[in-house]
Amino acid sequence: MADDNSNRAAFRLITLDPGHFTAALVQKFMYPDVDPLVSVYAPGNDDLAEHLKRIERFNTRPDQPTHWHEKVYTGPDFMDKMQVEKPGNVVVIAGNNARKTEYILRSVQAGLNVLADKPMVITADQFPRLQQAFAVAASNHVLLYDIMTERYEITTVLQRELSQQPGLFGELVKGSPDNPAITMESVHHFSKIVAGASLKRPKWYFDVRQNGEGIVDVSTHLVDLIQWEMFPEQALSPTDVSVLSARRWSTPITREQFRQVTDADTFPDFLKPDVKSGVLQVYANGEFTYRLRGVHARVSVTWSFEAPPGGGDTHHSSMRGTKANLVIRQGAEQKFKPVLSVENAGKADDAAVENALKVAIEALQGKYPGVGFRRSDKVWQVTVPEKYDVGHEAHLAQVTENFLSYLRAGRLPDWEVPNMITKYATIMKAYELSR
């Protein structure tokens, strides 16, 4: 039975064809006005079984156990059934990306709000359908939003905040194709730990025709951050973007590595076209350079099989200002924890930069008490209290909380939808150019 909250809950979740762990992580915690009864519509497959196991682990953990109740419908008509029954008002979509744009469009056509994992679209020919979905969402007065967890990572937040301090940062330089004003680089791994357990990847995850290439997947986060940091709370348009160059390359996955993360002894038939000399070649990597409102930016996404000992997914980011550069590093030297550094751009002496940093950090104490800095060699490292280092899984809860606040208000910020459209337009241009 659902608890008493279900009678007064403003929001009721529908999970549609869950296949990515993000679908479960949305439910890692309870929310006061979300009904604990969740309706799940899916084909009856391994993806669904893994999803339900994750929810059960949340429900049975000793620390902060959740109390979700999953009402499951399986069958080939699961999408039609969901559209007819509509047992909730918020659809969570995170899984196989081959039909994701269709799922999004059909959900908003049914008058349902949508919280979707990235990417919302994986091929350029589907982009008009996504644009249609945003138009339908607006006409049906429902919200369509993608899950951008990286906006909540503390060093990224502080990089954005400090870039808005002209006494320290100056102005963002324009850069050039060879030396962009802003770079975002992300390294991910097929083998990883999620919610305390070794992640079992679905076999389709290695098929770019179902999951999307690297240049359209993780790059969604990076393009989002570039827009969010360079032009905060400003509405952008695809006409603001020129993609200058793009490339793609593959990650080799052996049969043993594939077995390790999928439990499958052989490559399935749908992956056979990508197997060369017994090794699977996954086009999980991509890089592109583009110009946004005259400012040059570069995005790079790479995937390897597993991280070095003690490591994990990493993020590198650099913003170049006329007075200082703001650089996030997350390598072995940083013990694989993101560290934000402030570097003198060379137009002032170090004492002036340090004084400007002191003023900027002082101005942040109201929002981020305890944040400080220390000199390290020729740079200044921003020091962050441990309480802000909550991790990726908690960021998903923060995104969900934020989306619920938008639902309560009945609207997204005015710049969000134009910038989602611009983000995916940029990525689709890069995808086409890389090929």
Image: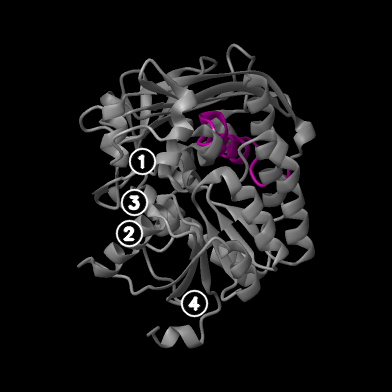
Mark 2 or mark 4: which comes first in sequence? Answer: 4
SS type, badge 3? loop
> Looking at numbered disc 1 in the image, what kind of residue is underneath it?
Gly
* Quarter of the figure with residue 235: top right
* Residue position for label 3: 390
Q: Residue at x 69, y 55 (%)?
A: 105
- Mark 2 and mark 4 in contact? Answer it, CB < 8 Å: no
* Three-letter code for the amino acid on which mark 2 is drawn: Arg
- Residue tagged 4: 33
Inspect the image, locate mark 3, and give the three-letter code of the amino acid beneath it.
Answer: Val
- Rendering coords of residue 337 (x, y %): 31, 35
**Earlier residue among tags 3 and 2:** 2
Q: CA distance from mark 3 to mark 4?
A: 23 Å
* Count of numbered badges drawn on the protein: 4
Residue 119 in view in this figure? no
Within 10 angstroms of label 2, few (less than 14), some, or many (20 or more) residues? many
Decide if residue 277 is on the left or right side of residue 137. Answer: left
Label 4 CA crowd tier, 10 Å (few <14, some 14–19, many 20+): some
Assess whether residue 150 is covered by the magenta stretch: no
Q: Which mark is residue 372?
A: 1
Question: Of helix, strand and loop, which one carries label 1?
Answer: strand
Residue 54 — which label? 2
Select label 4 or label 1 by which is in front.
Answer: 4
